[in-house]
Image (spheres, helix red, strand yellow):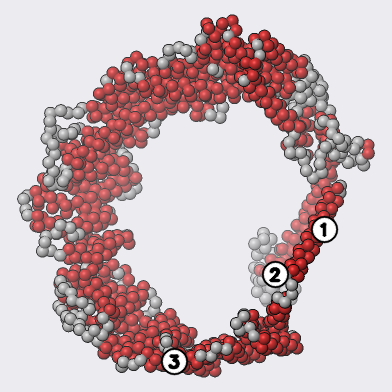
Amino acid sequence: MLTGMTEHASYPCPLCRAAATLDGPCPGCGRAPDPDAAAVLAYDARIAELAPQVEQARSAYESLSGQLSQLRRDREAYATKVRVAVARERSAHQPTLLTLPPTTGSLPPGTVPPVAGAVPGRGPESSPRTVQNLLFILGGLLLGIAAIVFTAVAWATFDVVGRALILGVLTVGVLAVPPLVRRRALTATAETFAALGLLLVVLDGYAVWYVNLGGVADHWDRGFYAGAVATFTALLGYGYARVVGTSATRFGALLAAQPALPLFFLESSADVAGWSAVFTAVALGDLLLHRALRPAAVAPSAAPTSGDADRSTAGSVAPDSGQARTAATPETGASPGEQPAAGASVPRQPGQESGPAAAPARTAGLPGRAGLRVLALLAYLGMLGIGGLLALVAWLLGADPDTAVTGSLALLAAAGVLAAGLGQARGGDAAGFALPTAGGVVTVALAAALARPALVQWHHYWLLVMASAAALVAVLVKVLGGTLAARWPGVRAGMIGGAALALGVPALCATGWALGEGWQSVLDATPWWAADPAPFDGSYGWQLPVSLALVAAAAWLLTGPPVPEPVRAWVAAWAVLLLPLTVPGHPALMPWSALACDLVAAAVALAVALLLRRHVVLWGVVAGLLAGHALLAGAGSPVLSAWALGGVVLLGLAAAAIGWRSALVPEDGTRTLGGTGTVSTASALHGVRVLGGVGGAVALALLPPAVHSVVAAAGVDDPWSRRALLATALLSPLWVYLAPARLRDYAVVGGLVGALWALPGGQPPGDSAAVYAALCTLALALVAMRSRWARAELPAQAVLALTLLMCAEALHLIFIAPWSWLDRVWAGDPVGTGLTAYPSERLPWAYAVALLLLAPAVAAWFRRGGVRLMAAAGGVVAGVAGLAALAAAQAPWPVISAVQLVLGAALLVLAGQRPYGALTLAGGLFGVLLTGAGLAGSLAEKWSTIAALALVTVALAVIAVGGRTRPVRTAGWLVGAAVKVLLAIAVGEAAELSFELTAYLVLGVAAIVLGLAYAPFAREQRAAAEAAAHAAALVALTLCHGYARSIALVLAVWGVAVGLTVLAAPRGQRVLRAAAVAVVEAVAWCVILAAQGVGLLEAYTLPVALLALAVGWYAARARPDLSSWLFAGPALAAALLPSLAGALTEESGTPLRRLLLGLGALAITVFGSMRRLQAPVVLGGGTLLVLALHELLLVSRLLPTWVPIAVGGAVLLALAITYERSRRDVARLRGAVGRMR
């Protein structure tokens, strides 16, 4: 609402135009206040205020837009000047090509001259410098290889003077070239010759050894001489680089220096640790060189140089990377990243200011410093890798104290050099990774160095030695960590991680050993209740518990601050979990020692979780694992099992009591434990409540086996102890119903597991397994009724499936065995109940009892659907139990089959009358099952089969007419038609009629169904009824197999029946039905002809074609827009194509047939052309053309054999000439277009 629309605002009255206000009626006409009219007036005022502001803003926008356009035009003009300047400078640096670009004076004003040598539409794929460097590299490699081959192969063909003269003069000459060419700014040439010269120096050393100059081969060791040559080459390369200024010799010197020290020690007797020290020393030298080559700090310049400004401007107006690189390269020809030679002047770029203010701030340093650093780093990594690997080998292979000590020292040295290298990276991006890694590496190496000599000396106590070394390192880290962290931040974290890794090795070993001890105690308890463990032999293995305790103490010390507090809790939980497994030893001190240790440790874990309320989940899991191990370790005898199960049940009940007590505290309340000052938060109370609930669930789950063990330990017979187990399991729903509301969900879980102990397994011989399973199902269903989860019913459903599987004999006899009468239809000898065609044993009553016990359980599952659904579900199961009871009572045939049939048909009719749903679907499926079994059981006699089929027919007719939904009625029509066909066949077989007469009965059924399809009550299911009628007619046709006349009669009669439906069919379906009638009658005609032995092809095709043409002509009259290919094409194809095929064959291709076919095709073509129809013209003309070609082929056989060959050659020659001419024209056109500019 606008601010101007107030109660006192006046507005002209829309009716009388008098001034009115909103606080009263109009004074002129008495009209009520009109807020809309007042709003119109207020909006008019607001529009009048905003209109000038909009015009002012539009003017300002147009002014600013004009200024922006002018600025863009000015910027483009200056950018064009920059492009012209860059192009001129680039053309000045490029070599002269054959085609020179036009001068600037010959171009129109403002035109940018093209770059010299550039091809329009395509730029060069590589720069000149790239090609130059590639050529130099390839040439240098080839020359180097040639020199090596010359020295190795062709050396022996010259004498000593010639050899010395050749290599000396060549080496001096090559090394003399770089100083000369560097003066002409040929840097790449100088670098190439310098590298070749340094290679020739190495070859000179080889030559001196080969000719034994001065007796070097006689007095010097091979390795020492090679080291000396490498050292001389490195020094020469370094000195040459300092004097001449080449970069290649620096790289060569660094490469030559790598093998120098190892070659000096090649002939020595150093062991693996010594060689590790040698390579580690070389790696240290490389690391020092890498540190010395660090770039110096760059002094910031006051302002960017004009050259930089030109490059940035050029990059902004023409962002081409190649142009930017070309413009940034100095004119001296030095490679990127190098500085000009000493004394060389750097030419000033156009427009560059001269003077100190414009001079760039450059870093004085060596040429190729970055590459040299990279090479030094790679050499450091390679040498350190070799040295570290050798140190690790020496550490592993140390078999005596001396070699173990030297190997450990070598490993420490390698770790120190690696840590020093990592320390060099602390200023880069890896600063947060380098120092912690360095600390971790040194810590792990120190632990390994401490452990290895002790392991060699006291190898029997290997676990204790490793634990002691790791614990000592952990203490050192704890003591020295703070001091080192103050000097090198980040090292402390790495040291803690390294100490943890060092502790991890004995911890893993101790864990595996402890788990093995625990598993051995479990194996000692097998077989259950009949174990015979080995007695204690007096020797106790103390190494494992002591080592485990030492590792746990070190880990506890190491996991203090700044390590997060939960880590220490995990360490304590790990120790409490594993120590009870190791204390009893093996053989155990006492048979009950493992059980006692587990229960005590589990009680401690539960006390920590429930009383201290810290890390409840962790300690609860530890307690659960220990309790599980106690149950397994105590299963050796009934007494130990009773103690184990009783102890676990008591612990669970105690946990449940504490959890129930915590459940009494409000969720948001707090409570202080007496004397501790610990405040329990709501989350801790929730954790205690959860752990208590889990403990209670475990107690309920283990109560039945605990009672079983106690009864068995008391000496009661096994059958009664198992019945006690069953009774306790069946009482599980009672404990669930008595559980507190806060813990009821956990009680449900425990009750479900407890009820599962009622499952059959080892029951007394006189008891039925099916009854046990049914009772278990009932107990599970009662427990699930107290649950809030729908999935709580899954165990009961699974046990129900198991119960049904156990009752498979009864279910098979009721539902599957009756189908055996399919092999003995109308045998007439049913025995007993008649459910099976073969003799069978009497069904026990236990199956009926078990199925009856399942009825309330199944009804309980459907309690959410209402009383009706419960009654239906329970009634179905009870009905099956009743059928099982009739089978157990040996009811005579056909009582059970009749009951099944009547119940099934009634269920089908009832399901058909109800709306679609799960209950309807289940009832329908069960009805189908019962009906099928009853129908199969009635196949023993003819009268029973006919009566059963008649009953099913009536039931399906009721469903087809009075079904609730359309799919149900459709199914009733389809299945009903099938059953009617079976009834007709059964009547025919019972009356001993022939197949032909039986086929007529089936055809009569098909005609009845087809007639009923057009009744008013079958309007919606007309399509289904017609499909069923056609299927029945097909069955009738199948019954006439081998009787041609009967087949023709059936087809003819059915064609008439289908023809009658044309009168009642919709207009759109009449043509299709007429076509179907024509097809059926045509097939009947052909069958009659075949039965009479007629062999003339046209006798079959022409009547069919005439029928098809008549149907098509009728369709064309109904639809004038129909194409001739649709209404006449099939008929003409049926008339012409078979006759054409017969005319082209040798046997039937007589001149008379070809003449008549040609006349007919001519008549069709003329008729089609007169009526302007496409299909007659194409089909008739095509037939005439094929006949004409056939006649031409017949005539060609009378000609000489060379004529067809000559004609074919002439055709191919003409094609070849044409193809060549076309290729020539295309080549000329391509050349002409390519020469265009």
Q: Residues within 10 Å of mark 2 (few under 14, many from 20)?
A: some
Q: Quadrant of residue 810?
A: bottom left
Q: Residue at x 65, y 16 (%)?
A: 157
Q: Residue at x 54, y 9 (%)?
A: 217
Q: Amino acid at mark 2?
A: Ala
Q: Is residue 834 left or right of residue 361?
A: left
Q: Quadrant of residue 295?
A: top right
Q: Is residue 905 left or right of residue 1230?
A: left
> Percent x, y for residue 437?
46, 27
- Can you identify the residue that label 1 sits on? 1221
Mark sitting on residue 37: 2
Q: Amino acid at mark 1?
A: Arg
N-term mark: 2 or 3: 2
Q: Is residue 336 above or below residue 806?
A: above
From the viewer's perspective, is the residue at label 3 or at label 1 nearer?
1
Q: How many marks?
A: 3
Q: Is residue 7 above or below residue 422?
A: below
Q: Is residue 426 above or below residue 977?
A: above
Q: Residue at x 33, y 21 (%)?
A: 451
SS for tag 2? helix
N-term mark: 2 or 1: 2
Q: How far, Cα to Cα, is label 2 from label 1?
A: 89 Å
Q: Residue at x 20, y 75 (%)?
A: 884
Q: Amino acid at mark 3?
A: Ser
Q: Are marks 3 and 1 in contact (CB under 8 Å)?
A: no
